[in-house]
Image (spheres, grey):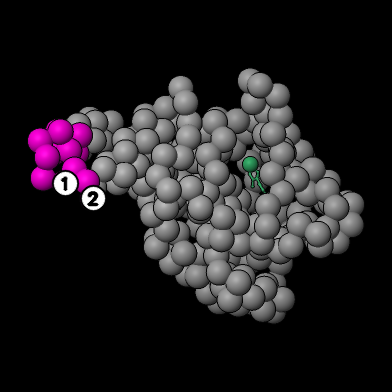
Amino acid sequence: MSSQILNADIKNTCILNSTYLHVRDLLTDSEVNKIHALFKSGTFDDGRLTAHSAAKAVKSNLQLNHQTQEHTAIQQIILAALNRNPVFRNAVLPQSIHPFIISNYKPGMHYGWHVDSPVMGNMIRTDVALTIFLNDPEAYDGGELELQTANGNVLYKLNKGDAIFYPCTQVHRVREVTRGERNVAVSWIQSLVKETAHRKMLFEIFQITENLRNKAVGEEEYLLLQQHYSNLLRMWAN
Ligand SMILES: O=C(O)CCC(=O)C(=O)O
Ligand SMILES: [Fe+2]
């Protein structure tokens, strides 16, 4: 299936590569700075506390204690940014979002090859995983998020404020950080639409509808397209 960005407005804000959605500037610079300040005053725990048994063995990082006010404040900033983002809303179709893990990798830390649990927290089915990069890629060496795909591995190390969304079905790892520190926010989303291929089709139809809005609103074909979008979403929503 083709996977392209069809809408000019959306094109400036994200890159869709197969099923990997890279959203640019999900967080503004001012939000990243606020998060950085909260990060510095936070209390961090061993990341193995939140890993399931097989993942524990390969995980080495630090995570902001989730019972702190810093964690609550960072999570609020991120949730507000996600809620206002039309690409996120229409491409991911979020139903539930797992509380964020705010993590820090120092030199020597990594998260080896693993699969994420299919169900997490408050019975959230993990359909889409996301990593939001919270510091400059130049600030550290290594630390790439690496995903295994049928066409070879793909690596992501994005600008601060950018996010990558990927299907939870993929084996992945975080490569060892060899210099500096890697700060990210990570979460998992249960989508209204479980199948990645269905979400992609809906996102493409949504963009076509947006493209046609000005010239075709009121036309019969436009109404039919909207009807099919609505009915497909209703058919696939769970
Ligand atoms: O830090 C990342 O980019 C991903 C972390 C991860 O794979 C996980 O927490 O399960
Ligand atoms: Fe993971």
From this view, report whether residue 18 is shown above or below residue 93: above
Q: Nearer the viewer, residue 145 or 223?
A: 223
Q: Is mark 2 within 8 Å of ligand 1?
A: no
Residue 233 falls in image quadrant: top left
Q: Is residue 1 left or right of residue 141?
A: left
Q: Is residue 63 left or right of residue 20?
A: right
Check whether the beta carbons of the residues at disc 2 and disc 1 lie within 8 A of each other: yes
Does the magenta portion include 217? yes
Instruction: Find the magenta span and give its range.
Output: 214-226
Name the amino acid, label 1.
Val
Q: Residue at x 52, y 49 (%)?
A: 14
Q: Residue at x 76, y 38 (%)?
A: 112
Pointer 1 local density, CA inside 10 Å: few below 14, some 14–19, many at least 20: few
Q: Nearer the viewer, residue 210 or 47?
A: 210
Labelled disc at residue 217: 1
From this view, report whether residue 200 is shown above or below residue 143: above
